Amino acid sequence: MSKPLSSTQVAFFREQGYLLLKGMVPADLRERMLAVTRDHLQRAVAPLEYEAEVGYEGAPASLEAEGGRTARRLRAAWQRDPVYREWAGSRALVAILHQLFDEPVCITLAHHNCVMTKHPAFGTATGWHRDIRYWSFPRNELISVWLALGAETPENGALKFIPGSHKLKLQPEQMDELDFLRPDVAANQALFAQGIALSLEPGDVVLFHSGLFHAAGRNDSDQVKCSAVFAYHGASNPPLAGTRSAASEDLPLED
C-alpha cells in the first residue's frame, strides 16, 4: 500500500486530531455528487432525517410546523447512488486511511454514511460533541471523512474543531445527558476558546478522529450547504456485536 501522506501530515493528524486535504476531489466527481444531492433533496428521496426529528435548539417543533420538512441529512448515501460509493470507496481515499490506521480499511454504514445538509433559516447549530459518544467499537480509533460539496465558511455553518481534544481526559460533569460539552461549566469555556473554524473550498476534505470535539454553527447565508460524510475504521477494530454500530453493514474496502 502506498503512503500518500507525508510524515508531517501524519504527525499533525496524530497530534491535532484532524487533517485538511485541499482540493482532493476532482470537480467532475464533486459536481456529480452535488447534482444527485440536489435532486434527492428536491424529491425528498428516503431515507431522510429532518431538523424537527433531531430537536436541537431552534429546530421546528414538528414535521407539520413551519420549516418542519427541512432536511438535516440524506441518509444511506453509500446505498443511495453509485456516485457516493465512487468517492467513499475510492483508491486514493482508502490509501490515505490505510496509512493512518496502519492496516486494511473498513467503512461502517451504521454511522454517518450521509450527505449533511444545512439549510438557511431552519438549519440548526450543533454543539460541541465527539462522534464516539454513540459509536460502539473496541477502540476509539475511527476516522470521519468530511467532503465539502460547496464552499463552507463560518457564515454558512462550517465545521469547528478543538485541536488536540481527542486526547483530553474529561470529568463527567463537563458533559450533558447527550454527551455534549456543557456551556455552563467553566472548564469548558476555556476549551471553547480554543475552537477553530475551517473554511473549505468545494472539493476540500477534512479527516478527523472519532474522539475530536467538533461543532457547527447555523447557516446564515441564502444557500443550502451540502457535505458528504463517511466513517471508517481499521480491520482489527470491528463494531461490537449487538450494538447500533453493528446494526448495518460493515464493509472491507481492500482485497
Image (tube, rainbow, N blue to C red):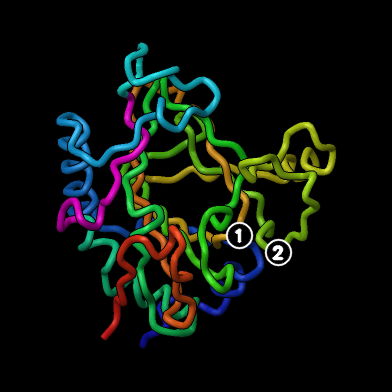
- Counting from the top left corner in percent of width and height, residue 158 is at 49, 39
Residue drawn at x 66%, y 61% as measured from the top left: 166
Where's the C terminus, which quadrant?
A: bottom left
Say what amino acid the circle numbered 2 marks: Lys
Tell me which residue sits at (55%, 24%) in the image: 57
> Which part of the image, by quadrant, shows the N terminus?
bottom left
Q: Which mark is residue 43?
A: none
Which residue is farthest front?
242
- Magenta highlight range: 70-83
Q: Is residue 5 left or right of residue 28?
A: right
Establish if 55 lies above or below 238.
above
Mark pair 2, 1: CA separation: 8 Å
Residue 247 in the image: above or below residue 105: above
Give the residue type that dot 1 points to: Gly
Q: Are marks 2 and 1 in contact (CB under 8 Å)?
A: yes
Image quadrant of residue 11?
bottom right
User: Does the segment drawn in magenta span residue 78?
Assistant: yes
Evaluate whether residue 225 shows in this view. no
Viewer-closest of 62 and 196: 62
Which of these two is toward me, 21 or 57?
A: 57
Membership of 62 in magenta stretch: no
Circle 1 packing at 10 Å, graded few (<14), some (14-19), many (20+), is: many
Look at the image and tell me whether residue 20 can be seen. Answer: yes
Q: Mark 1 falls on what kind of element?
A: loop
Numbered tag placed on residue 211 in the rendering: 1
User: Whole-percent x and y of residue 79?
Assistant: 20, 56
Q: State which tag comes first along the sequence, 2 or 1.
A: 2
Q: Nearer the viewer, residue 211 or 16?
A: 211
x and y percentages locating residue 165 in the rendered image? 69, 56
Q: Quadrant of residue 92?
A: bottom left
What mark, if any, has residue 167 been given in the picture?
2
